[in-house]
Amino acid sequence: MEKTIFEITKMDCPSEENLIRMKLNDISGIKNLSFDIPGRKLTVFHEGQIEQIERSITELKLGGRKLITEATDQTTFSESSDQRKLLWSVLIINFAFFLIEMSTGLLSRSMGLVADSLDMLADAFVYGISLFAVGGTFTRKKQIARLAGYFQIALAIIGFAEVLRRFFGAEKMPDFSTMILVSVFALIANGICLYLLQKSKSKEEAHMKASMIFTSNDVIINLGVITAGLLVHWLDSNKPDLIIGTIVFLLVVQGAFRILKLGR
């Protein structure tokens, strides 16, 4: 058996890990995948097929490049038996906060919360695709990925249109207190998701928990919405909310294209 170490420069949260797992799960020669998210490294234990593995990782455009391939005597791997349960847990948390942020965003007139809700939905899509792909056919996985990606892009386009309307129109100020309060709870929810996902890792990787929380895009987005809420209050302007909304919508579209790559 061989092990190949890849550097994945754009892998900074469990969503990218799941994308990579889904992309590689149909390569029969792969025996195990080991992720070091803070170090942005992926170790693939495999029997041959390195060209196909390298090509699949490159196609995701996550900055993946092969570092080294070497022989290994390792044949046993510690796999968690409750991975499916954990995936369901983080899916439910992300989808619940999609509903919470979308509803409170509309009620408080905050595009930042609406955009962040779509980012939560994007993560829920990724975990959902992972679950439905388990035991399913390659064709079904591709169909689900395409549907999720196009739906996400459609929602982001609607969001962009609303940002433009509010930017040039006379719109009421967003409720900054709701923006901050809901984003704080979303921040906690993302921390819980990252912790739950790490429960499936080996003890040697337990140190990843804190690093992942601070390096996750989701956490950065939550902090961005909180900052925008404070600026809305201090500047008495809705522009900070519209700016953070635009940034997050761009990230949502980027994530949607990554999901679509799985449907090819």
Image: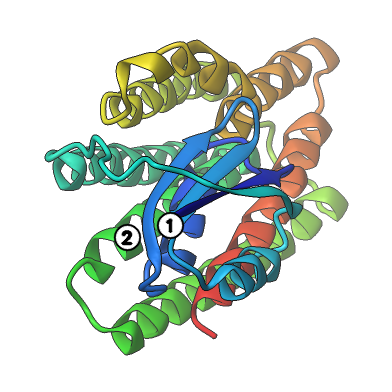
Which residue is more in the foreground, 141 or 46?
46
Which residue is more in the foreground, 15 or 65?
65
Q: Position of residue 28 (x, y in %)?
A: 36, 73
Q: Position of residue 44 (x, y in %)?
A: 50, 51
Q: Position of residue 167 (x, y in %)?
A: 83, 49
Residue 259 as seen in the image, left or right of residue 140: right
| Amino acid type at mark 1 | Arg
Q: Mark 1 Cα within 10 Å, few/some/many (few <14, many 20+)?
A: some
| Amino acid type at mark 2 | Ser
Q: Mark 2 Cα within 10 Å, few/some/many (few <14, many 20+)?
A: many
Residue 177 occupies which quadrant of the picture?
top right
Mark 1, secondary structure of its residue: helix
Q: Circle 2 is placed at which residue position? A: 130
**At 50% across and 53% down in the image, what residue appears?**
2
Q: Position of residue 94 (x, y in %)?
A: 35, 41
**At 62% across and 63% down in the image, what residue appears?**
57
Q: Which mark is residue 220?
A: none
Say if mark 1 contacts mark 2, CB within 8 Å: yes
Q: Circle 1 is placed at which residue position? A: 21
Query: Which comes before the other along the chain, label 1 or label 2?
Result: 1
Tell me how far mark 1 sits from mark 2, CA to CA.
Answer: 8 Å
Quick check: 246 above or below 50?
A: above
Residue 97 occupies which quadrant of the picture?
top left
Quick check: 59 above or below 228?
A: below
Residue 221 as seen in the image, left or right of residue 138: right
Quick check: 264 above or below 11?
A: below
Residue 241 as seen in the image, left or right of residue 225: right
Mark 2, secondary structure of its residue: helix
Residue 132 shows in this picture = yes
